[in-house]
Amino acid sequence: MTRQNSTIHRYFQYIIIAFAFFIPLSIAAYTFFAAVLLILWIIEGGWRNKWSIIQSNPFFRAIALFYMFLSLTLLWSDDLIQGFEHLRKYYPLLFIPILYTSLDRRYIPQIVRAFLSAMIISEILSYLIFFDLMPFQYKPSWSSTDPSPFMNHTSYSVFLIFTIFLMLTQLLSQEKNRLQTVLYTFFILTMTINLFINSGRTGQFSLLVALMVFFITYGRLSLIKTLLSTTVITLFIFSIAYNLSPNFHKRSQETIQTFHYLLTQNKPLSDSTGFRFMMWHTAGIIISENPIAGVGVGDDRIAYHKVLETTLPQYKKEIEGFSDYHNTFIQIAIYSGMIGLILFLNIFIAFFRNIDNNKDIKTMGAIGITLILLFMLIGHLPAAYLTMLFVLITSITLKSPHDVVFRH
């Protein structure tokens, strides 16, 4: 490595640390640092080694195959402008090979600490919002019923859970002094409480799944021990949350009411859960009519309104204004059929097959990607903050010690 390469390489690591810090805090900031990383990556050079690393990794091949087929569906799309807009949303995934090829594993602890610091700041702001102590109103939506500082409550829940287990892993695997142990324990507890004072229900369910993944990957427990441990902890945490958190109590009651109405009246309520049922019913018809290759990446809205006009007019008044299906897997199946959905799922299969064997890093990756998969059941990825979190997690947890562009 030349002296210039070495300097650029070192700057690249510093910018990744800044990038990780701003992921939970600011879209504008992490977009800026992403652009700086791209420039440094280009200046750094080492193209032959970088290309060799990228093409030899099954994860990157899986992403390329999916994106190429998604682009191919433009051939049977009528709305090409909308199609190119959908394809543009996947561009941030290009930063995964950029970070992956130039990331120095020695800087991973600093990257993790930067991310944790940002989440602590975010959590403090959340509590200030919840207790009506914020001296300013950064977002009109800030209120004690929805104390999510910078992102919507569903995305914020994913960040909180990921941070809880990231801190727990750090606490258990690294030697801490008494003050550090107290601080880590304190923030794990306060972030768990924060999860339940937020409005989201999906986040609370995701906590249970993440707990199971943690027991399996970090604790290396058997499936039976994992289920028993998770059940005990679940009953304890949820019973406390149900009785002490007004938001959690209210949202739990709403969910029970929605499912009861659906089962007894055979139709969904006009609430957030009911709207999703209506949209997924509409999507099911679109997919059944275009099962193999979908309607094309640009024509999802055209197909959506066509079904509402001809097959499900009873839903039209309720859901005709929605912009997506609030489910990534359904969205992709509509775009590109079963072929596109299989190629998309193959990305995550490739990830779990190639994740780092280090116990701490493996736990981080397994929990982070599991949480994003759960989010995709009720949300659409790419999705701003979560897309960048996905980029960071995959870049770090797939990194092989042998994939080095420059030898020191």
Image (cartoon, rainbow, N blue to C red):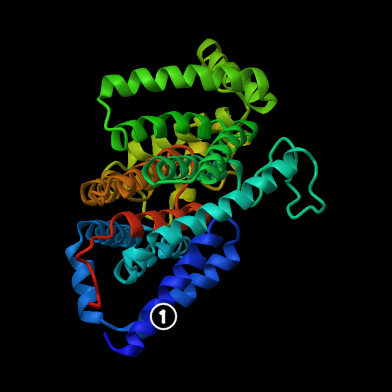
Q: Position of residue 156 (x, y in %)?
A: 56, 44
Q: With respect to residue 70, does 168 lie above or below?
A: above
Question: Type of residue at label 1?
Answer: Leu
For label 1, count other residues whose C-alpha is less than 10 Å away and answer few (under 14), some (14-19) or many (20+). Answer: some
In the image, taking residue 327 as reference, residue 396 lies left or right, namely: left
The quadrant of the picture occupied by the C terminus is bottom left
In the image, taking residue 335 as reference, residue 134 lies left or right, namely: right
Q: With respect to residue 38, does 141 lie above or below?
A: above
Whether residue 40 appears in this view of the structure is: yes
In the image, taking residue 29 as reference, residue 341 lies left or right, namely: left
Asked which quadrant contains residue 173, the reply is top left
Q: Position of residue 204 (x, y in %)?
A: 52, 30
Q: Position of residue 66 (x, y in %)?
A: 28, 56
Taking the spot 32% from the left edge, 54% from the top edge, the residue there is: 397
Asked which quadrant contains residue 166, the reply is top left
Q: With respect to residue 129, does 116 lie above or below?
A: below
Taking the spot 35% from the left edge, 89% from the top edge, the residue there is: 4
Give the residue furthest to the top.
Answer: 264
Q: Which residue is mark 1?
A: 40
Q: With respect to residue 81, does 373 lie above or below?
A: above
Of 281 and 171, nearer the camera is 171
Taking the spot 38% from the left edge, 21% from the top edge, the residue there is: 229
Q: Position of residue 282 (x, y in %)?
A: 46, 35
Of 5 and 150, nearer the camera is 5
Taking the spot 56% from the left edge, 23% from the top edge, the residue there is: 268
Whether residue 267 appears in this view of the structure is: no
